[in-house]
Image: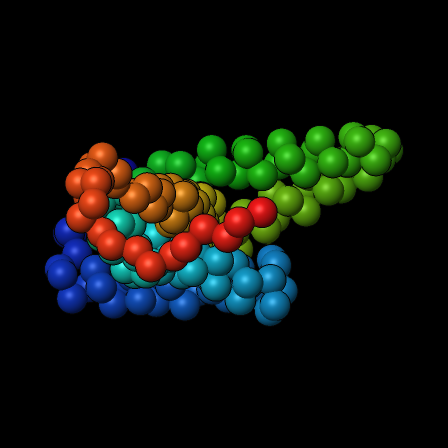
Amino acid sequence: MSITPEVSPPSMSGFFSSMIAEIGARRKRLRAAFGDRSQALVEFLVLGGLAVGSLGLLLGEWMPAAAPWGFALPFVFVAGFFLIEARRQAGVARFRRDLPQINADLDAQEWARADAELRANERSAVFQAEAKAKFESEAGARRQYREDNPDLIVAAGYDWAVFLWAFFCALLGAAAFIIALTARPEAAPPVDDGWRPPEGAVSSDIVPVAP
């Protein structure tokens, strides 16, 4: 008989400490995936898009009225980030709770990927049998790894969600700035009210020159 551990919901302090730890871990994963320069460029583009979409609207007095929703983008970005983080932490808690039941399914998924790779490389039946035996002998190590690293295992599914959300908000910020910048009103033409001074009201000393 297996006993499912009870997972209590995290406190606010636990939520924020887990979020801060995940932000640092995610930056390391981005750096490993894109490199130092590309990771810095990604962060610059995201922050730049949010900045020009809000603070950039203050460059012209006509711009806030053209795209007022740009000022809300930083708050929308933060709210979406918190929602994704809450779902991630709930996913980690669910993974811990359900791990005794899903270990067999996770093993089956991992072996299916390994077996497909072996078949793609046209390995012999003997080699496949040896690989299967080794895979089964490492079941305990895999399960221990899952118990020790639930955050790392679950986080991979949320990295792209955070990445796409951040770029979506940055693109909205850039769009707000462009819309506001191109909405600059044209200078009004001088108004001609049709008034002319009455004849003889203006004296002139100019004498026409005879041809």
Q: Residue at x 41, y 68 (%)?
A: 24
Res. 58 image quadrant: bottom left
Q: Nearer the viewer, residue 208 or 160?
A: 208
Q: Position of residue 123 (x, y in %)?
A: 84, 35
Q: Position of residue 68 (x, y in %)?
A: 23, 45
Q: Residue at x 59, y 51 (%)?
A: 138
Tell me which colouring the rendered structure shows: rainbow
Q: Residue at x 17, y 40 (%)?
A: 198
Q: How many marks?
A: 0
Q: Position of residue 119 (x, y in %)?
A: 78, 30
Left or right of residue 124, residue 85 in this image: left
Q: Nearer the viewer, residue 40 or 73?
A: 73
Q: Position of residue 181 (x, y in %)?
A: 38, 48
Left or right of residue 3, residue 207 in this image: right
Q: Is residue 176 visible?
A: no
Q: Residue at x 38, y 63 (%)?
A: 23
